[in-house]
């Protein structure tokens, strides 16, 4: 049985190898790394892999070593996600999972 919602916290270490190239001198956590956190949360929540990103909107940056959380919820047969740093929305969208 699946619960209607799931949350998990995460932090991307300041020394992560993807950061120097994204962007030199002013690193930001790449959007693909945020989606990786969505995929990890889906696996923890439902034991499913991320099969498809239906839509994703990145609205604010996440900086290295900042703590954020990803929240998943089920609505109308889809899984919605939000990534926040405190109350600030960083990204949102919907995904499909598969076993």
Image (cartoon, rainbow, N blue to C red):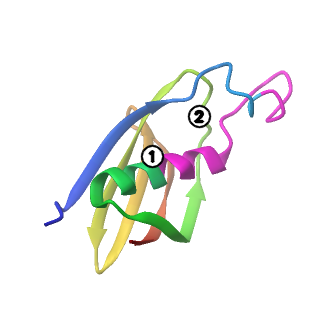
Give the secondary structure at mark 2: loop
In which quadrant of the rendered view does residue 52 lie?
bottom right
Rendering quarter of residue 86: top left
Left of 42 or right of it: where is 93? Answer: right
Residue 35 sits inside the magenta stretch: yes
The image position of residue 10, as x and y in percent, is: 44, 32
Query: Compared with residue 75, is residue 12 higher up or lower down, i.e. above or below?
Result: above
> Looking at this rendering, what residue extends furthest in the left direction?
1
Q: Is residue 36 above or below residue 65?
A: below
Label 1, secondary structure: give it: strand
Q: Nearer the viewer, residue 8 or 88?
A: 8
Rendering coords of residue 2 (x, y %): 18, 64
Quadrant of the snapshot with the N terminus: bottom left
**Measured from the top left, where is residue 26 in percent x and y?**
78, 24
Q: Which residue is mark 2?
A: 62
Q: Residue at x 27, y 68 (%)?
A: 74
In the image: residue 28, left or right of residue 47: right
Name the one closer to the observer, 45 or 83.
45
- The magenta region covers 20-38
Q: CA distance from mark 1 to mark 2?
A: 10 Å
- Residue 83, numbered circle: 1
Q: Is residue 30 magenta?
A: yes
Q: What residue is at 38 percent from the left and 50 percent from the top?
A: 41
Who comes first in sequence, dot 1 or dot 2? 2
Looking at the image, which residue sits at the far bottom?
76
Q: Check the picture and name the quadrant holding the C terminus.
A: bottom left
């Amino acid at each position: 049985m699946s619960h209607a919602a799931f949350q998990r916290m995460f932090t991307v270490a300041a020394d992560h190898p993807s950061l120097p190239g994204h962007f030199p001198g002013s690193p930001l956590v790449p959007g693909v790394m945020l989606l990786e956190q969505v995929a990890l949360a889906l696996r923890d929540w439902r034991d499913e892999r991320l099969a498809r990103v239906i839509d994703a909107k990145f609205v604010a940056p996440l900086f290295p070593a900042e703590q954020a959380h990803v929240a998943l919820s089920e609505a109308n047969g889809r899984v919605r996600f939000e990534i926040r740093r405190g109350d600030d929305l960083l990204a949102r969208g919907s995904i499909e999972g598969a076993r």
